[in-house]
Structure formats: structure tokens, C-alpha cells
Amino acid sequence: LVNADGSIGETIFGQMTALAGRHDAINLGQGSPGDPTPDFLIDAATEAMRAGVNQYAPGQGHRVLIDAVAEQRRRCYGQQVSADEVLITIGATEGLSAAIVALVPRGGEVIVFEPFYDSYAAATALAGGKLRAVGLIEDGAGGFAPDWEAFERTIGPQTAAIIVNTPHNPTGLVFTAEMLTRIYQAAVDSDAWIFTDEVYEYLVFGDRQHVALASIVDDPSRVVSISSAGKSFNITGWKIGWTIAAPAVRVAIQAVKQYFCFTGGAPFQPAVAAALNEHEDFAHTSARSLAARSETLVPAFEHLPGVRVSQPQGGYFTLVDFAGTTDEDAYALNERLTREFGFTGIPGPALCAAGTPVSEAFAQTIRYSFCKSEEETAEAARRVRAAA
Ligand code: PMP
Ligand code: GLN
């Protein structure tokens, strides 16, 4: 959390997890999956540990995972990736932070679509960059789309980078190829980097498809594609992620990354490689069960009179807007719903930059996750309906 005075405080996820804990409430706040980690991953990591993969991994990561990531990009998106373009990171979070610190100059502007995952603001602050938020606005059909007018107004020669998170946390928007092409063209015109955050890449619902921006553009050299294994394989605690960028850019990101953590998760790296190579079906199955859980939770919120509920196209979350139903702000409301009804979310304003007009639009929104177990999601839905 970046405070108004520029200092960095505890993440909202830690704060809301503590709130849920104090009231023994169901934690629909932090996106921490309720389903178990599959045995094939636990076995593969155990095997790697027994085989002695317990010391520092090479700075770029273990070759077996580098190759698996390159192959996954080719297989899923037709993107040609060579081994010297891949860097293994401590989750997508470290990849994002290292890319931002490596490539955004002091005072350079970073455009984010608001609301946004909180680490973008903190990493931009670390880099001495300036965050510029462009709103996602309701499309009238339960979904969201970028506010293009605001985007055109915001981008310019001062723009150093644009961060695009698809599927999107917290709105559930899956950016279309058309949206991504428009963002790319604007980045070319302003000579800006694009950092994609694709951590929910497998978790798209119905017949929608995740589009990897770097795979559809003429010149991916201004794109850093970032993802991780946490959400795809229910291993958020393993923190294995990666960045994909042109070789010289990868070297620049790695130079920063080595002073964040150097390397990490050595025995988890071959296990994630095996998951990508052989168990992609697990991630596709997760997408279907998350879609089903969203269909348990979303209608429960729709049962509350007057609220507006986003229809997630992918990812872990729905955003519920309580405007017009209460005078409470999102923090007070979330606390009361936790206390009285036993379910906790993440206040939408915590995922906005303080004081922006967009953050006003999200003042009474709360983000809820449907990534808990089927039973817990069903129990949460009962509690939500009881709050009507
Ligand atoms: N980006 C987004 C949009 C997220 O929601 C999250 C957290 N789930 C992350 C990045 C962090 O990913 P990781 O745990 O791999 O660092
Ligand atoms: N990415 C997860 C979320 O948005 C949690 C991240 C965290 O706890 N830092 O809920």
C-alpha cells in the first residue's frame, strides 16, 4: 500500500486477512486458492529436493523451466521465444518490480488501468516513476472496458510504460485482441514499454480466450510479458514466475532482479517445468471449476437489492458496487459485513490510486474472490444471501 505521504505500508491483503481472522469470517479477500495443490507437483518438487536441487539456482533460472516457459508461449500463443529471452523470477510480483525498476526512468510515467493490483503503484514508487491511472468503466452489460478518452488524454511522450493485466484483477475483464492492439499502437506512438501481467492466463471462462499481447504485434521488443505458476496450479506460496523480453531487456531486468532476491525456489522450478510441459489440463480444469464457483457467488450478490455485480470473464474475482444502497464507504461496509454476516472482501478503493476521479467511482465497491473451495464458496454464497 502506498500511503498519501509516499511511504509504503502493509498490503491490503494482509490487513483484510487479519480482519477475516479476527471475526472467524470466510476470507473472500486475498486471492489464495482453497483447492489443494496437485500431487504431481508435490511429487516433482520432492523428487527435485531429494535429487539435490536445493542450492542457489542460476541467476536466469533453471534451464529446464526456461525451456518449458518458451515452449508454453509457442504452444499456447504461437509466440516464438528463445531461451535468452526468459527470466525466472520470485513470482510475477518480482518480475513486475524488476522490470519497472530496470526500465522506467525517474519521473517517467507509468499508465495503469484502474482499479489495479496494488504492487504496480509500490513498484512505480520504488523506481521513482509517476503513476497515471486510466479508469476501467462499466460497459453496460456487467463488464468493463478501458476509458479510451482518458487513455488518449493520458498517454504521451512522457509515458515510460503501460501495464496491462489480463484477465484483470479485480474486474474480471479479459482484454480483447482489439483492445490490446489499440494499446500497443499508442505505446509505439509514444515510444513506451508495455508490461503485461498474465498471471490468470489459463483462467478464462466460457469460449473466451486469453490473448498474449506480445504474440499479436509486429514488434514485441517493447513488450515485457510477465506471468507465474501460482494461480494456474494452486501454488501461490511457491512464488515461481517469469518475464519474457528481448535478450538485452532480459539482461537489464535480471541485473535489477539479482539485487532483489538473486534467485529463489530452486526445487520448485523443475516441478513447475513439468507442470507446464505435461499438466496444462489441470489449469484448464481449474478454469472450469472457477467459472462454476463464480456462478455460485455472483448470483448471491445479485440477490442483494440495488447492488451492481461485475460478470467475470476470467480470473479470481468479482467486483460488487454497493453505491446507492448504503452511506458507508467500502472499508466500513466491508468491516460490517465481516462482523455481521461472516464474509470479507477487499475494498475497491484500496486497488485505486488515492484521490483520483476513478477512485471516487469505485468508492463503494468491494472485490470478492471465488477461488475458495466449492464448499466454502457455497457457504459464502449462503452468508451473502443472508445479508439481503
Ligand atoms: N498480478 C496480479 C494481477 C495478481 O492478482 C497477483 C496476485 N495474485 C500477482 C500479480 C502476483 O503474482 P505472484 O504471486 O506470482 O507474484
Ligand atoms: N494477488 C492476490 C490478490 O490480489 C494476493 C496477493 C498478496 O497477498 N499480496 O488477492
Image: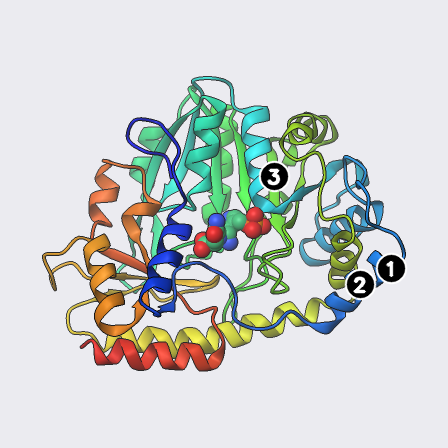
Judging by the rendered image, the residue that carries numbered circle 2 is 46
Is 332 left or right of 136, judged from the image as shown? left
Q: Look at the image and tell me in which quarter the C terminus lies.
A: bottom left
Of mark 2 and mark 3, the one earlier in the sequence is: 2
Of mark 3 and mark 1, the one earlier in the sequence is: 1
Tell me the residue at 20%/67% (across/down).
307
Q: In which image quadrant can residue 311 be found?
A: bottom left
Instruction: Give the residue type that dot 3 points to.
Output: Gly
Is 141 left or right of 204, judged from the image as shown? left
Judging by the rendered image, the residue that carries numbered circle 3 is 95
**Alpha carbons under labels 3 and 1: distance apart:** 28 Å
Instruction: Give the residue type that dot 1 points to.
Output: Arg
* SS of the residue under disc 1: helix
Instruction: Give the residue type that dot 2 points to.
Output: Thr
Frontmost of labels 2 and 3 is 2
Is 323 left or right of 95, judged from the image as shown? left
| Disc 2 packing (10 Å; few <14; some 14–19; many ≥20) | some
Eyeballing the image, is 274 above or below 103?
below
Frontmost of labels 3 and 1 is 1
| Disc 1 packing (10 Å; few <14; some 14–19; many ≥20) | few
Judging by the rendered image, the residue that carries numbered circle 1 is 50
Eyeballing the image, is 242 above or below 206?
above
**Alpha carbons under labels 2 and 1: distance apart:** 6 Å
* SS of the residue under disc 3: helix
> Residue 171: x percent and y percent?
37, 56
Q: For ligand 1, tell me if the residue under mark 3 lies within 8 Å.
A: yes
